[in-house]
Every structure is written in structure tokens, then in C-alpha cells.
Image (spheres, grey):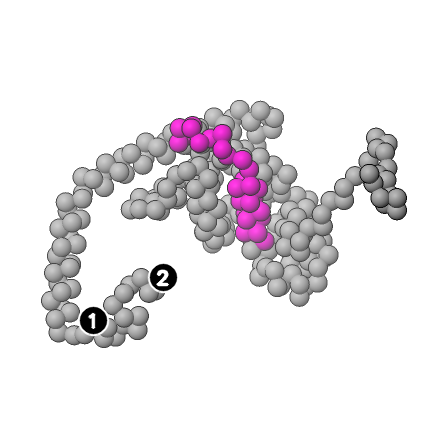
Amino acid sequence: MPSANKPSASPSTGTDVAVATPKPSPREAAVEALMRLAAEQPWNDIEVGDIAREAGLSLAEFRDLFPSKGAVLGGLARIIDRKVLDGDATDLAEEPTRERLFDVLMRRLDAMTPYKDALRRISYALRGDPLSLLALNGVALNSHRFMLAAAGINTEGPLGRLKLQGVVVAFARTVEVWLDDEDPALARTMAKLDKEIRNGERFMERADDARRLTAPFRALGRSLLDRGSRRRSDTRNEDEGNPLGGDPAAAI
């Protein structure tokens, strides 16, 4: 029996008040501000002060978050990463590797869709800027390490770095098609992604074959290097001149 002084619940009227949208963090506000600006004006015309004003931040607050507008793109990449990784991928567990990777990368494109206009303009602006493209490649490597992990694909081992760079290139080529694909079904984009994944599979198979074929030569080279290293170590202490001692893992 409810307490006499406890107010009873009000009956639903069918006009429930909408839940307020959570206020974005300052970092998210800066990312969203840059995307709004980039969708409307040339990339090279956007200054850090413009982003700060659009985000409702002071320059000092913006500086605490990002060192440049390019760094804000790295912030966008992390937001996209989180959206993809927060998704439920349990239904992919029994799928072939190719299907798992295809699904994860399509989910990434879905997460990028709200920013498509801005990304199109940014992509065109940076095509002739090799230094910016190199920096963005580093951002993409970090992102796709987690995309491959979400697809259950190992990125460690002798061919791990090659595999990781390969998926970065494959996705970049797919994005070029996606940026101009206005079909809601994204038929061209999906066909391109499928082709890139299949090409990547064939390349990795050839790379793995080449690695196996050259294994005896690499083993011989390591043996010769180890023999020379042992001869040199006989004449000095193993820690001499090495502030980390004899354990190379101490540098990790």
C-alpha cells in the first residue's frame, strides 16, 4: 500500500516531454564546429579562431584541446572509431573474415555519413598536400588497427604492419568512390569495397608465400648477425653504453 504522503505517479498523457540531448564535450563541440565550417567554406580559409568561435570556446580552451585544425580531424577519427566499436558485432562471429571486415568498414562509412559534405571538401583540398596526407595516414593507421580488431583480424606478427597499411589504402580508395556516391543503396561503394578487400586478400597471400620462401635466407642472415654480435660482446660488458641494460624490452 503506497504511503499517504508519497505523491502518486501522474498518468501518461501521450505527450511525454522529450529527453534533452546531452551537451557535447568541448572536444566534440570543436570537431562538430570544424565539420560545419568545412561543409560551407574552403578548408584553407578556416582558421583556429573560427573553429573556437563556432564551438563556443575561447582560444585558450581550444588550445588545451587541439594544437591545430588538422588535429581536430584526428579527433573526428576517434569519434568515428568509438561509434563503430560501440556497435554490436556479435552476429558477425560466425561469418568469414572477408564478410566481417566488409561489415565493419561499411559501419565506418555509415558513421561518417553526417560529415560527408565536409569530408568531400576537405578531401579535395588536401589531395595536393603530401605532408598533410602523410599525417592523416598515421591517424588512419591507428583507427584501422581497431577496425581490424573489431573484425577479429590479427595485426601483429611479421606481416601485421603490411596488413594494416593495406586496409588503410583499401579504405581510402573506397572513400573516394563513397564521397561521390549519391545512391542511398551505395551500390558503387559496396562494389568498390568488396573489390579492394578481395585484392588485399590476394596480395597478402602472395606476401605470405614470399615470406615462407625467403625464410631460410632470413634465418641464415640472422645467424650471421648473431655470431658477429657474440664475438663483439666478448670484449665488452653487455650493459656498456646501454642505459637500458641488456633487455631491449625495457624501451617499450
Position in image of residue 29 (x %, y %): 67, 52
Return the residue nearer the eye: 39 or 109. Answer: 109
Secondary structure of the residue carrying tag 2 is: loop
Residue displayed at 18% across by 43% down:
214
Q: In this rendering, is residue 209 above or below 227?
A: above
Residue displayed at 37% across by 31% down:
199
In the orientation shown, which residue stands out farthest toward the front? Answer: 1
Task: Characterize the local packing of mark 2: few (<14), some (14-19) or many (20 or more) Cα atoms within 10 angstroms.
Answer: few
Mark 1 or mark 2: name the one nearer the start of the chain. Answer: 1
Quadrant that contains the N terminus = top right
Return the residue nearer the eye: 129 or 112. Answer: 112
The residue tagged 2 is 252
Q: Which mark is residue 238?
A: 1
- The answer to whether any part of residue 41 appears in the image is no
Principal secondary structure, stretch drawn in magenta = helix
- In this rendering, position of residue 177 left or right of residue 226: right
Find out whether residue 91 is within the magenta segment. Answer: yes
Position in image of residue 32 (x %, y %): 66, 48
Secondary structure of the residue carrying tag 1 is: loop
Which corner quadrant of the image does residue 181 belong to?
A: top right
Magenta part of the chain: 72-98
Q: Amino acid at mark 1?
A: Glu
